[in-house]
Amino acid sequence: ARQPQISVTKDGTVQVVYGKEDVIYCVTSTDNGNSFSEPVIVGKVKDLLLGMAMGPQIASSATHSLVTAIDKKGNIHSFALAHKINKWTKTAQVNDVAGVAAEGFISIASDENDTFYAVWLDVRGNNKNKIVLASAKAPLRNWSTNKVIYQSPVSTLSVFCKPNIVVKSK
């Protein structure tokens, strides 16, 4: 297992996702991390990127949890969990141009209104890294049009820098 990431739901459930080969797993704890469930398969991604800060990411809102993962072709996959149903389902691809996230660096966050946000290194247009943003509202069936939010005026962003996002609700 590689690249564990953690999230805590509104009710205090601790969720840890990680990858092993082409499979994404999640374990949960309802006792502050003293014990964890058996692993549950979130989904499968052919040629899943793992290692060096690349791997599945997780964020939780009031009613949903979301996992994103990038494949070696540079496509960002997403999986959603409705907390009431407690079943992971594959949702829409995050990037709206195929193959632009090949660096493998993505971060996600959510707000109190069940909106999720993703930022990643993206090479669309000129094959130089820039930071791109997309959002999705629960039940997470579609992602917004991707928007370039930063690009270097003189060069490209480092291929070793993972962008981060934090969301502050009103």
Image (cartoon, rainbow, N blue to C red):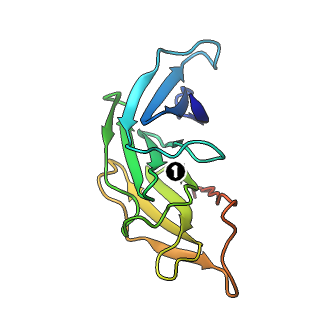
- Mark 1: few, some, or many residues within 10 Å (few <14, many ≥20)? many
Residue for point 69% across, 59% down? 160
Residue 36, quarter of picture: top right
Residue for point 61% across, 42% down? 51
Q: What quarter of the picture does the N terminus occupy?
A: top right
Q: How many marks?
A: 1
From this view, report whether residue 157 is shown above or below residue 10. Answer: below
Q: Which residue is mark 1?
A: 110
Residue 44, quarter of picture: top left
Q: What quarter of the picture does the C terminus occupy?
A: bottom right
Q: Amino acid at mark 1?
A: Ser
Q: Nearer the viewer, residue 164 or 83?
A: 164
Residue 82 appears in the picture as rendered = no
Q: What element does badge 1 sit on? A: strand
Q: Locate residue 59, reporting x and y percent.
A: 52, 43
Residue for point 70% across, 68% down? 158
Q: Nearer the viewer, residue 151 or 50?
A: 50
Q: Locate residue 109, reporting x and y percent.
A: 55, 51
Residue 95, quarter of picture: bottom left
From this view, report whether residue 14 is shown above or below residue 119. Answer: above
Residue for point 44% across, 43% down? 66
**Which residue occupies the extreme bottom position in the image?**
154
